[in-house]
Image (spheres, helix red, strand yellow):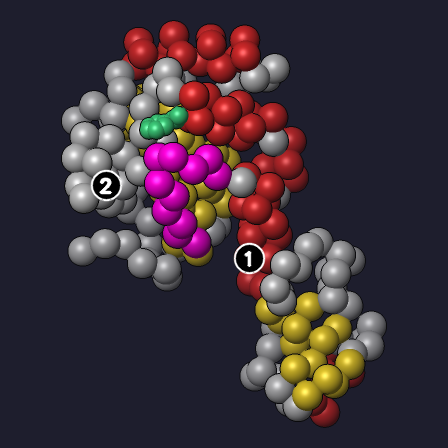
Amino acid sequence: MALRLGDTAPNFQAETSEGYIDFYEYLGDGWGILFSHPADYTPVCTTELGSVARLKDEFAKRNTKVMALSVDGLESHKGWISDINETQNTEVNFPIIADEDRKVSELYDMIHPNSDENFTVRSVFVIGNDKKIKLIITYPASTGRNFDELLRVIDSLQLTANYSVATPANWKQGEDVVVSPAIKTEDIPAKFPKGHKVIKPYLRTTPQPDL
Ligand code: BEZ
C-alpha cells in the first residue's frame, strides 16, 4: 500500500554515490528529505540536483539531510555528478541512490507506471526526526521542483511540531501564524504572550512564537 502522511518512513540500505548507506543511520536524530528524479544526464534533473547542492547550508540550518535517487547505476551517477558540478556552479554534497533493482523506488512507490513504466517520477518525502512522513509531493518529469518551497515547508513543519500553531497560505519565516483551533481564545495570552488578533472566532493570529 502507498505510503501516507504520518506513516513511519521505511528504512532501507542502498548503494549510493557516497557508499553503502543505512537510511536511518544517515538521518540520525535529524530530519530528512528523500527525493527521486527520472534519470541521470537529463536537463531538468541536472538543474534540480544543482539547486539542492547549493542549498546545503539552508538544509543544515534546519538539521535536515538530503538523499536523491534514480534507477541509474553508480558509474552513471559518478559521471553525471561531474557534469552537475561543472555546469551548476556547485559540488554535489549528498548521496544519490543507485536503485538499479528498484528496491527503494518500489518501497516508496516512486514509479508511476501510467506516467512512465521505467523511470521514477519526481517524488519528495520529508521525514521528521521521529521518522514519520510529514510531507509527500509528486511532480511529473517535465516540471522541475521549487526547492525554496521545500525549505519553507520544513520551516512550517518544524515550527508547528513545537507550538500550537499552523501557518497560513504563502506564510514565510517571520510572518504571523494562526493559533490552533484547539486553543480557546481566553487561553491565548498565556500561551502566546507576544499578542494576538481575533479576526473571527475561528481565525486568530499571533506573531511567530519562536523568534
Ligand atoms: C529532465 O530531467 O530533463 C527530464 C527527464 C525525463 C523526462 C523529461 C525531462
Residue at image location 66% in from the left, 90% down from the top: 201
Instruction: Decide: few, some or many residues near mark 1? Use Cα within 10 Å; few <14, some 14-19, many ≥20.
Output: some
Q: Residue at x 61, y 64 (%)?
A: 169
Amino acid type at circle 1 is Leu
Task: Name above or below for residue 140 compared with residue 196.
Answer: above
Seen in the picture, residue 99 relative to 194 is either above or below; the reply is above
Residue visible at 43% across and 54% down in the picture: 135
Residue that label 1 marks: 157
Residue 49: % across, % down: 48, 26
Mark 2: which secondary structure?
loop
Quadrant of the snapshot with the N terminus: bottom left
Three-letter code for the amino acid on which mark 2 is drawn:
Ser
In this view, which residue lies farthest toward the front? 142
* Viewport quadrant of the C terminus: bottom right
Q: Is mark 2 within 8 Å of ligand 1?
A: no
Relative to 3, say whether 54 is above or below.
Answer: above
Q: Comparing marks 2 and 1, which lies closer to the viewer?
A: 2
Q: Quadrant of residue 79?
A: top left
Q: Which residue is mark 2?
A: 115
Q: Quadrant of ligand 1?
A: top left
Q: Which residues are magenta?
A: 135-145
Badge 2 or badge 1: first in the primary sequence: 2
Residue 44 placement (x, y as % from top left): 44, 26
Taking the magenta stretch, the answer to whether it contains residue 70 is: no
Between 70 and 95, the one lying in front of the other is 70
Q: Secondary structure at mark 1?
A: helix
